[in-house]
Amino acid sequence: MSGDEAPKPTGFIASIVAPVKSVFEEIGILADLAFRAVFWGVRPPYRVPLVVAQLEFVGVQSVFLVGLVGLFTGMVFAVQTVYGFRRFGAENMVGGVVALTLSREMAPVLTAIMVAARAGSGMAAELGNMRSSEQIDALETMAVNPVQYLVVPRILAGLVMVPVLALIFFLVGVGGSWAIGVWGLSLDPGIFADRIKTMIVPSDIRQGLIKALVFGFTVTLISCRHGYFASGGAVGVGQATTRAVVWSVVAVFLLDYLITSMLTEV
């Protein structure tokens, strides 16, 4: 080893340094891709048909899945809340509590997870296959910026459609909780609706939409990052798809805590 070469960490130190280093490297790659997406997103040409196609892929094709999950989430949460609140005679608060939880937490978080599992995995697989088959290199050869052509439309679709899907999740979830609470558990429909109107304020809906906006950007950015830089053929594409979903879910929960801490007044 030459005199100016730094010694490499080994053993226990290496087991600590390596994960930390990989995390910072990942953050750097994501920040670079996000900067390039913003830079190329505001420059012409504006590829509206590509954006519309991604809006359909991320949003329209996810409506049924998000609505179904929202319906059963609202129903299950209503059943569990009634069961717990009846122990101390507070079952009349079920409607407000369910709506509050859906608007601030369940709707944006579960919507982002559903989008990551369905659309995010698809983005990573598609971009990974394009990288593996050298289609991305071909775009560069034709003087077409791959980030502007492939990444920007997907991120824009996430920014627009995830808040819309979260709102659909919320409305369907509240409807499911009302149905199971009123028809199945004999709660008073007037009191149920009144508690929702009393407990839900605009800031609750706003917080959920802000979370959904951030989650939409994050999920699509992570999915595009792992697909765009995939390597290793079919095996590498599969691994990139798995990493995209896993890290998207981890990022959603981490950001959920940070945003809640910043927006919630204690």
Image: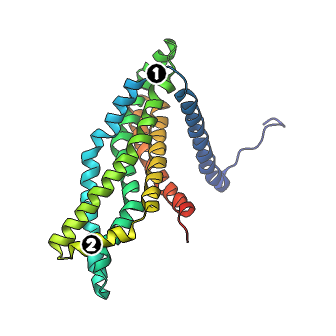
45, above or below 1, in the image: above
The residue depicted at 37 percent of the width and 71 percent of the height is 198
The x, y position of residue 5, in whole percent, is 79, 37
Q: How is the model colour-coded?
A: rainbow
Crowd around label 2: few <14 · some 14–19 · many ≥20 (10 Å): many
Residue 166 appears left or right of 190: right
Q: Position of residue 245 (x, y in %)?
A: 41, 45
The residues bearing labels 1 and 2 have C-alpha atoms spaced at a distance of 54 Å
Tag 2 or tag 1, which sits nearer the N-term? 1
In the rendered image, residue 118, in percent from the top left (x then y), is placed at 33, 43
Mark 1 Cα-neighbour bin, 10 Å: few <14, some 14–19, many ≥20: many
- Look at 59% across and 50% down and name the residue there: 19
Please name the amino acid that badge 1 sits on: Ile
Give the residue pinned by disc 1: 136
Answer with the quarter of the image where residue 102 lies.
Answer: bottom left
Q: Residue 25 at what x, y percent from top left? A: 61, 42
The vertical placement of 236 against 65, above or below, is: above
Quarter of image, res 262: bottom right
Element at label 2? helix
Picture quarter with the C terminus: bottom right
Q: Is residue 231 visible?
A: no
The residue positioned 55% from the left and 59% from the top of the image is: 258
Mark 2: amino acid: Phe
The image quadrant of residue 28 is: top right
For label 1, the SS is helix
Q: Is residue 22 above or below residue 73?
A: above
Q: Is there CB contact under 8 Å for labels 1 and 2?
A: no
Q: Is residue 227 visible?
A: yes
In the rendering, which numbered label is found on residue 192?
A: 2
In which quadrant will I find the N terminus?
top right
At 62% from the left and 50% from the top, the residue drawn is 20
